[in-house]
Image: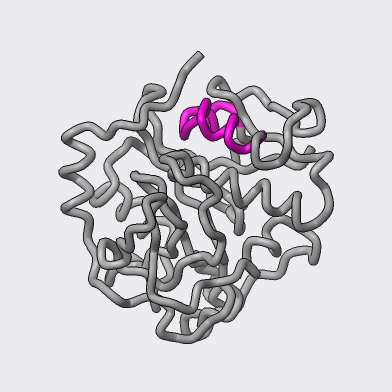
Amino acid sequence: MFLKSRFLSVWVLFSMLLLPGCPGAQNEIGAKKISEIPVPKGSERIPFPKDSFSEFVRHLPLKSEKTLLTFQKKNILGRYDTIGVLDLPLLFRDDLEQCADYSMRVWAEYHKQTGNLDRLYLFDYNGNKKRFRQSGLSYTSFLRKAFASSNSFSLKRGAAQISESDLRPGDLFVQNEDGGIGHVSMILDSVKHPNGKKMFLIGFSFMPAQEMHIERAPRGFGSSGWFTYEGFVNHLKESYPYGTPVLRRFPES
């Protein structure tokens, strides 16, 4: 059984120090939730069913204070250029809720907050579904066990494959070539321009375990902080080189 390493390699530590970003840019627009973030000029939010996972993700709350906390309560907001940070505090005081884990956390919160925990599943390392209702564990213990024994490779193996044209909030960009260190980013909102072009708000947690922030699209990678699909793929290639991203979705069970 694979056990997730909690020790970063020298290369990963070095790459973290070089991450692009400018300090203090978080949530200066005053948005209280993702759906209140202004859209690029001429674009409109793409509608989704009221009780869907996509709509739940779009309405996740944002922190008002300028903090992005690690599991050690260290504020690392200045490491990134952010639009906002999700107001979904870390559950654990150890290095568990990294990128893949936090994406699974959002999926779990959807089931918890909508009263559907009997339908909740997460993945083991090999991508096999592990169902909460069969675990005999509390909600928190179930998440701890799943986070400790899975990573981005698990999502690559277990989640459903999707196409670029079908991307929606809650979908994932998964990078993992060989089962080791990878990266997961989650689409948090989507809009469409009358010319047919789609753009996305995209967020992720990282190493060490930390809250999920919304990454601001650099100039040339999108518009008004929103990414185009091509822009985000290029952003990952330049700043988070953990392999070619594949597109995945948590399938409804």
Report if residue 40 lies within the magenta region.
Answer: no
In this rendering, is residue 46 above or below 162? below
Q: In the rendered image, which quarter is residue 104 located in? A: top right
The quarter in which the C terminus is drawn is top right
At 30% from the left and 76% from the top, the residue drawn is 24
Which residue is located at x 60 percent, y 75 percent? 35
Residue 211 in picture, x, y percent from top left? 45, 57
- The segment highlighted magenta reads 142-158
Is 169 situated above or below 191?
above
The residue closer to the viewer here, 236 or 91, is 91
Relative side of 83 to 49, left or right: left
Q: Position of residue 147 (x, y in %)?
A: 54, 34
Direction from residue 183 to residue 110 in the image, left or right: right
Residue beneath the point at 31% across and 37% down: 242
| Image position of 125 (left or right of 65) | right
Image label count: 0
Residue nearer the viewer, 36 or 211:
211
Going by the image, does 79 lie left or right of 206? left
Give the color scheme: rainbow, by chain, secondary structure or one colour: one colour
User: x, y percentage for residue 239?
Assistant: 25, 51
Magenta-span inclusion, residue 143: yes
Q: Position of residue 186 (x, y in %)?
A: 51, 52
The answer to whether 248 is drawn above or below residue 137 in the figure is below
Residue 27 falls in which quadrant of the image?
bottom left
Please tell me whether the stretch drawn in magenta is mainly helix, strand or loop. Answer: helix
Q: Nearer the viewer, residue 170 or 125?
A: 125
